[in-house]
Amino acid sequence: MGALPTLYAAVGPDVKGGDYYGPEGWKEMRGYPKKVESNELSHDEENARRLWEISEASTGVKFALDKKVSGFASKARDHNLGRERRI
């Protein structure tokens, strides 16, 4: 199904922030989207911090965080501050 789980996670009517979707088939390798558990590495705060920093450096886009967020933010608020966005 290729990108279908990703698309569903982006626009599915029942998707909530922090939900993780993948294929429902054998070993979650292919099939229609379903809500699944993410792996242990996806909950590693240090990895998330490093990825965030690399992403900002690579894109030149800086994000100002209003507060510490555990895990991924469920919604981003774009305050249209030039190239800086607040979440």
Image (tube, rainbow, N blue to C red):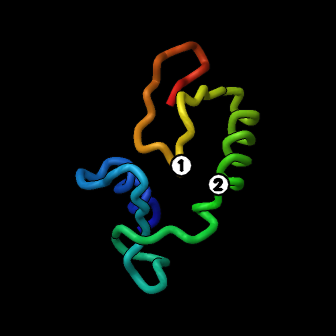
- Measuring 46% from the left and 18% from the top, which residue is drawn there? 79
- Measuring 63% from the left and 66% from the top, which residue is drawn there? 41
Query: How far is the residue under mark 1 from the one under mark 2?
Result: 8 Å
- Above or below — where is 41 with respect to 61? below
Q: In the rendered view, does 85 fall on the left or right side of 59? A: left
Mark 2 residue type: Glu
Disc 1 crowd rating (10 Å Cα; few below 14, some 14-19, many 20+) is few
- Measuring 66% from the left and 26% from the top, which residue is drawn there? 62
Where's residue 66, x and y in %? 53, 28
- Measuring 54% from the left and 33% from the top, which residue is drawn there? 67
Answer with mark 1 or mark 2, whichever residue precedes in sequence.
2
Q: Nearer the viewer, residue 71 or 56?
A: 71
- Above or below — where is 6 with respect to 65? below
Element at badge 2? helix
Where's residue 74, x and y in %? 42, 44
Where's residue 4, x and y in %? 39, 61
Q: Nearer the viewer, residue 86 or 35?
A: 86
Where's residue 17, x and y in %? 38, 49
Say which quadrant the N terminus sits in.
Answer: bottom left
Q: How many marks?
A: 2
Identity of the residue furthest to the top in this view: 82
Residue identifier under label 1: 70
Residue identifier under label 2: 45
Disc 2 crowd rating (10 Å Cα; few below 14, some 14-19, many 20+) is few
Check whether the beta carbons of the residues at disc 1 and disc 2 lie within 8 A of each other. yes
